[in-house]
Amino acid sequence: MYKKLISLIILLQCATSTLFAANYMTFTAEDYMCSFKIENHGGNDPDIQYSQDDGETWDKLSDGVIIYLPQIGDKVLLKGNNPGGFNQNLDVYTSFVLEKPIAASGSIMSLIDGEGESLVIPNSHCFCELFDDCSDLTKAPELPATTLTDHCYYGLFNFCRNLRQAPELPAEQLAPGCYGSMFFGCYELESAPELPATHLAYDCYSYMFEACSTLTKAPKLPAMELAPSCYESMFASCANLKEAPELPATTLASDCYILMFAECDSLKQAPALPATELAFQCYWGMFSHCTGLTQAPRLPARKMEYGCYGNMFYSCTSLTQAPELPATQMAQYCYEQMFMCCSSLTKAPDLPASNPYDACYTDMFRLCPNLSSILVNFSGWDNTATISWVLDVAPTGTFYCPSALPEEYGISRIPEGWDVVHIDVGVDGIDADAPWSIHTSDLTIFVTGAQTDVEVYNLTGSLIVKEKANKEETKLTMSHKGVYIVKIGNKSQKVEL
């Protein structure tokens, strides 16, 4: 009985010891003669202790002292007592320097509480650039914190070129800049961690995976309400990213998607962008230099904001069809360089706005050498709205416009050498808010929702066909393909067969 009691006590002690065992951050050698040290910058001097005997004894790790792991599998445990934070800012911080392949494991929070149990990061910039430029880091430590702070992980694994797997990131409420540049230049990163956060913050994901050239798929981004610059350059230069995440957000913020997928050469299809209310530069450069992009997203917004679509498809050399642009209220620089250098684009999207605004179309189609068709609805030239917008388009083409628009030619007006066709058919141009819908099949135009007679004109203003409105669907058949104007009451819409 006594022996059984002793055995039970020992088992309980073991269980208790296991249950409350510290989760120290640990370095494990993956080659012979590995080593590491710390470097303090700007006077930073956190408490760091290390153990080479599984925690039996601990020594202080001082700046510049090299710790060797001579055999494959050798381990060093790390902990610290830094309740006020580990690093202070981008000038006052401590970072590791590794030599030869080393895998990290255990909780990074052991550098804060000495055990790795805390889930609360105590200060801003706490772990900023901790493993900056550690090319020999092959595995990241655990990042269990659920309460983050400003820039707490900023540049944490910046240029860890051999890091292949990212740690879990469980936080659901983010802080400004918390993941900024976190995996910047991690060329071998094969998969991104799940990002469950729905409460974003300024700059929270900016540059997070930029230049992760092995990454092929992005994580889900479930947030419905965005924050300023939240996704800025998040996947820029991810050359092998083939699939973009869904972007369900309908509440945008200034610069929220700026340069998000810039230079993603393997991306062929853009994600849906359902937002109808835009924000300052919200889509600026979002897909710029995506040379493999062949399909653009639908852009349903009807009111522009400053620079909202600027550079959005700049140098998308495989894009052959532009998205519809139904907006009628312009803003300064809203379409600036939107399709510049889109060398495969042959037809511009219709521009239904009747009020071109200061610099709104600047360089919009510049250097599109195959573009040969443009339709506009404005009847006067704003001195700045169309600056250089058709520089180096196709040498011949057709410019559709109201007859009231002065026939002025040049790189900021109608392209030299193009024909002009007037779209007036007894109404004030093309209406973007028609209360009916149209779809086509071969030579047939189908109109749903018409309440009065449906008339179809050619672009010279001649009536081609007229049908009484059918409650369900009105069907009109043309004799040949071409561009037509469907007119119902005092509203009209261009259709191309």
Image (cartoon, grey):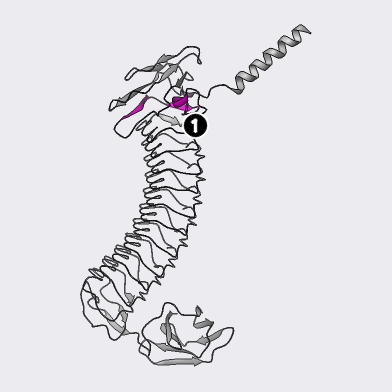
The residue type indicated by label 1 comes to: Glu
Q: Is residue 382 left or right of residue 476?
A: left
> Residue 29 lies in what quarter of the image?
top left
Q: Position of residue 341 (x, y in %)?
A: 29, 62
Which residue is rendered at x = 46% and y = 15% of the image? 52
Which residue is rendered at x = 47% and y = 54% of the image? 225
Q: Position of residue 228 (x, y in %)?
A: 38, 52
Q: Is residue 247 above or below residue 357?
A: above
Residue situated in front as seen by the camera: 55 or 241: 55
Residue sticking out furthest to the top: 2
Per the image, the residue denoted by label 1 is 142
Q: Is residue 492 visible?
A: yes
Give the magenta part as a residue range.
92-117
Q: Quadrant of the N terminus?
A: top right
Residue situated in front as seen by the camera: 393 or 414: 414
Where disc 1 sits, the SS reads: loop
Q: Position of residue 375 (x, y in %)?
A: 34, 77
Q: Is residue 421 left or right of residue 323?
A: left
Q: Quadrant of the C terminus?
A: bottom left
Q: Is residue 102 magenta?
A: yes
Label 1, residues with CA under 10 Å away: few <14, some 14-19, many ≥20? many
> Residue 150 lies in what quarter of the image?
top left
Residue situated in front as seen by the camera: 299 or 204: 204
Residue sticking out furthest to the front: 84
Q: Is residue 29 visible?
A: no
Q: Position of residue 252 (x, y in %)?
A: 42, 57
Give the total of numbered labels.
Answer: 1
Q: Is residue 87 magenta?
A: no
Q: Is residue 59 above or below residue 124?
A: above
Q: Is residue 5 above or below residue 325?
A: above
